[in-house]
Structures are given as C-alpha cells and as structure tokens.
Amino acid sequence: MKLRLTLLLAAVLVTVAACAPSQELRNPGFLQDTSLVNPGEECVAPCWRGITPGSTEWSAAISILEDQADITNLEIENNEETGELAATFQRRDGVPCCLLYSRSGALVDQMLLQLASGNAVGAVVDNLGEPTYFNGTEVDENQAAAALFYPDRGLVLYAFVEGLNGTLNADSEIFAALYLSSTDMEQVLETSTLQSYVGYKPFADYLDDEPVLTPQPQETTEGETTDGDVAPATTEEPTAEATATP
C-alpha cells in the first residue's frame, strides 16, 4: 500500500484500517507500553526508547528497534524518488501497530504508536502535565477520539471516548501516541483547528467550544496562498511505499 502519512487523527485511522480486521480504535494486540505513565529516567516524551523525532538519526532508530525484545516484523520501505523512508513494526504475538517515518532518510521525523491498555489520561496528565490543545473526531456512534496536544513535547495523544455522547475523563484510555519533530509540530499548529484543553468534560461540549487556533494561509507550489480550512491535522501526503498490512 502507499504510505499516506497525514498527521494527527488521520494518521491513526489510516493505520488502524490497514492493521486491524475492523476499524476499532482500541485493540489488545497493539503495543504494550506504559512509558507515558512510567517513563525511564533518561527518556521522557518526546523520547521513546531512545528515539526522538527531529534529532535521532534514522539508522540509529532502526538499530534501536532491532534490539527491542518485544518488537518484531520490522519492515522498511524506501521511496527512491523522494528519499522518504518508512518502517512498520509490531509487538511479538500482537498485530501491526506502529510506524516510523523519515522525510529525507537522515533523521526520524514522525513516530506513531498504537497502544494497548495501560495509559489512562489521568495518569498521563500526572506525569506529563496538562495538554495545551484539544481536537475531537467522532468515528462512529460508539467511538470518538480526543486528540490532546503537547506542543512543547512534540506529542499528540489520542484518548478513546464512547462516541459523541461520551465524556473525556481521567479514566479515558490513550490508544495512540504521535511523536513529531518540532518542525512537523509547527506545521500541525498552523494547519489545524484546535480548542483549548480545559480538563475533563463531555466530548460534545468540547466540540462546541470556540477554537483558539485555526488554519493559517498556506503557500502553494505556485507561490500562491490559500485559506482552505484543512481537515483537522492533515498536511501534504508523502508517498513512500509501506507494508502496513499483516
């Protein structure tokens, strides 16, 4: 399949659709990792197991993944025309869950981890502090995703909410984490519609809040600008080949 690495919820949903038999946001076969609530002394978000988007070299990141005892099926794809690289992987006895991406092949730019249970919002907030921004997407009547933005950490976390009528609370489960370079996080903030994070409350109430960030005009390849209201968190779509299907 073509890797269409759009940012934020779009990235999560594309990977979910490719990796899971049904488009369930939560899957017990995803990566078992609780570093968001129990970090190591030397690797706190935006670092994960020694990999930090924007500073870790691609080759070093691949070596780190190869040395992880709980990770398998590391697949690397290279787009020779653009220089983009993508790597997918999963936990042993699990399902494909995770993605590493480099725009130039030099440094890691983005890292997406879909997570099994063990990372409740309240525990993450106790560890990392409160997020700055919120963005919500209803997936179906029983599922919604609350994206919680930590711009200073280059981190976006996705919390499961039980549909439009659900509530974001301390027990809401983090089902995915997107780690970004500072450059990519800046682009996210420039192309997204985001509300302020104000704590725990009904999902629908968050959607009714006035945005504090809206998309800025973006320059096109012809040098023109457009106001287009970019769908929450999409950016240009790299076309590196990837093998995210089981």
Image (cartoon, helix red, strand yellow):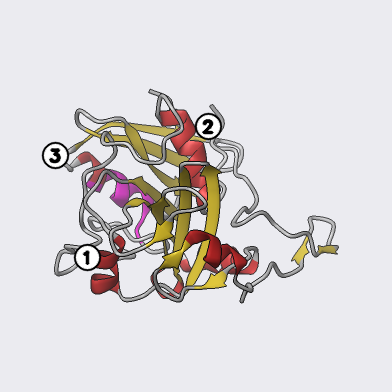
Q: Is residue 44 visible?
A: no
Label 2–label 1 contact, CB within 8 A: no
Q: Residue at the spot x=24%, y=73% of the render? A: 126
Above or below, 238 against 167 in this view is: above
- Reading the image, the residue beneath label 3 is 69
Q: Is tag 2's residue or tag 1's residue first in the polypeptide sequence?
A: 1
Kind of residue sitting beneath label 2: Glu
Q: Using the image, determine if residue 175 lies above or below residue 188.
A: above
Name the residue rendered at 43%, 68% in the picture. Answer: 201
**Distance between mark 2 and mark 1 Cα atoms:** 30 Å
Q: What numbered label is drawn on residue 241?
A: 2
Q: CA distance from mark 3 to mark 2?
A: 26 Å
Q: Viewer-proximal residue, 109 or 141?
A: 141
Looking at the rendering, which quadrant does residue 239 occupy? top right
Which residue is denoted by mark 1 in the rendering?
A: 43
Q: Dot 1, how many residues are within 10 Å of its Cα: few (below 14), some (14-19), or many (20+)?
A: some
Read off the magenta span. 56-64
Q: Which mark is residue 67?
A: none
Mark earlier in primary sequence (3, 2)? 3
Q: Quadrant of residue 99?
A: top left
Q: Whole-Å distance between the Cαs marked 3 and 1?
A: 18 Å
Residue at the spot 21% in from the left edge and 44% down from the top edge? 32
Does the image show residue 16?
yes
Left or right of 150 in this view: 64: left
For label 2, the crowd category at 10 Å Cα-Cα, with few meaning under 14, some 14 to 19 and many 20 or more, is: some
Task: Please tell me which residue lies in front, 85 or 190.
Answer: 190
In the rendered structure, the answer to whether residue 233 lies left or right of residue 132 reads right
SS for dot 1: loop
Q: Main secondary structure of the magenta part?
A: helix
Q: Could you say where residue 223 lies in the image, as x and y percent from the top left? A: 83, 62
